[in-house]
Image (cartoon, rainbow, N blue to C red):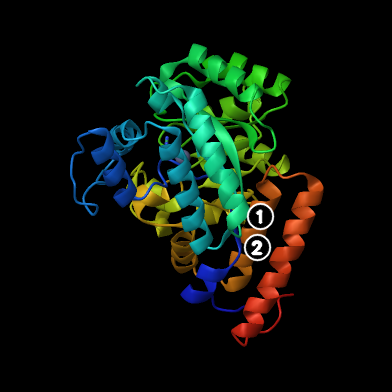
Amino acid sequence: MTTPATESHLRRLPKVELHCHVEGAARATTILELAARHGVSLPSVDPDELFAFTDLNQFLSIYDVICASLRTADDFHRIAYEACEDGVAAGVRYREMFFSPGFVIRLGVPVQTVWEGVSAGVRDANHDLDIECRLILDFDKPTGPAHALEMVDVAARLDRDLLLGIGADSVERGIDHRAFAAAFAAAAHEGLHRTIHAGEDGPADNIAAAVHELGCERVDHGFRLLDDPELTAEIVDRRIPLTVCPTSNVVIANVVPDVASHPLAEQRRRGVLATVNSDDPGMMRADLADEYVAVAAAYGYPLEEMEQISLDGIEASWLPDDGKAALRSRFVAEFAALRAEHGLPARR
Ligand code: ADE
Ligand code: ZN
């Protein structure tokens, strides 16, 4: 027997988030305040209109404007801390969060300033709030392989208690993903975890490059994976996780008209370790709880499947094995308490 998943229950379900950008998690009201402070002009001063986009390129040009409003370590501290506060409100207990210095270092903000602020914001949030957040440094793919190597060099010297690994984001079309092989090899040599945005609005071949030539341990998005059945079988066999962001693929990449048409359900049916994530919750005005509600509604998933999605996030994380086991025990206990509170039978 299965149990229907109600919205209020899903909102409180404990969750893991592995694909969330700190800049894209910024609140519109915060960006408006920081832009005013630094004299940066924005396309709109109405918080409801600031984040308007219809495709990835337009989204990334607004991302650029947001980043232009971030100048000091305090600014980065604030958006990192607020991103964690908003994550807690969505039930996120553990998050591996991207930050993308490429967008601001080209404006003259030192990468050390970015790290100082983001790391202090996350450290404070971990102390004050019911969340454990870690960081992933994303390099900017269009800036090229030399920037990628430079970012790996920076990452290798950061505090590994907070910084887990390296990733790559921004546009995908027209980018030769194999050109980043040296950067990812250097990251592996430094003991950094590795992931990359691939197959978001680009082909499954970019996912193949990620796992075969870049040595990535996870793939961010992977929307186009099922186009390649052989690669799908390999990803299933090797349990390489996808960090899927269904609503983002509807409203940012615009590669599917609605969540119901998204391949997530088919990926999971075929055994892919496909996790659920928000991507840019501030800019999309949809957090991870909204994402869980949308996924349950789109595929008719019962509570049991939503609990499994939450547990799959733990498996897909870069926590050490004992950390995964501890988080799993905590989640299972929280699932039971939530069920009891809702008068539902225990999970089997
Ligand atoms: N940076 C933030 N969100 C992104 C996305 N959806 N795709 C590529 N780069 C991003
Ligand atoms: Zn992303």
Q: Which kind of residue does numbered mark 2 sit on?
A: Gln
Q: Which residue is drawn at 65% across and 22% down?
A: 157
**Quadrant occupied by the C terminus:** bottom right
Give the residue displayed 52% in from the left and 25% down from the top.
112
Q: Do the residues labelled 2 and 1 touch (CB within 8 Å)?
A: yes
Q: Name the residue under label 1.
A: 312
- Residue drawn at (53%, 31%) of the image: 115
- Picture residue at 63% right of the left edge, 66% below the top: 307
Using the numbered discs, state the Cα–Cα distance from disc 2 to disc 1 in whole angstroms. Answer: 6 Å
Corner quadrant of residue 59: top left
* Numbered tag placed on residue 163 in the rendering: none
Q: Which residue lies furthest to the bottom in this view?
A: 343
Label 2: which residue?
A: 308
Q: Where is residue 153 in the image (x, y as percent from the top left)?
A: 61, 17
Residue 165: % across, % down: 63, 32
Three-letter amino acid code of the residue under disc 1: Asp
**Ligand 2 within 8 Å of the CB at mark 2:** no
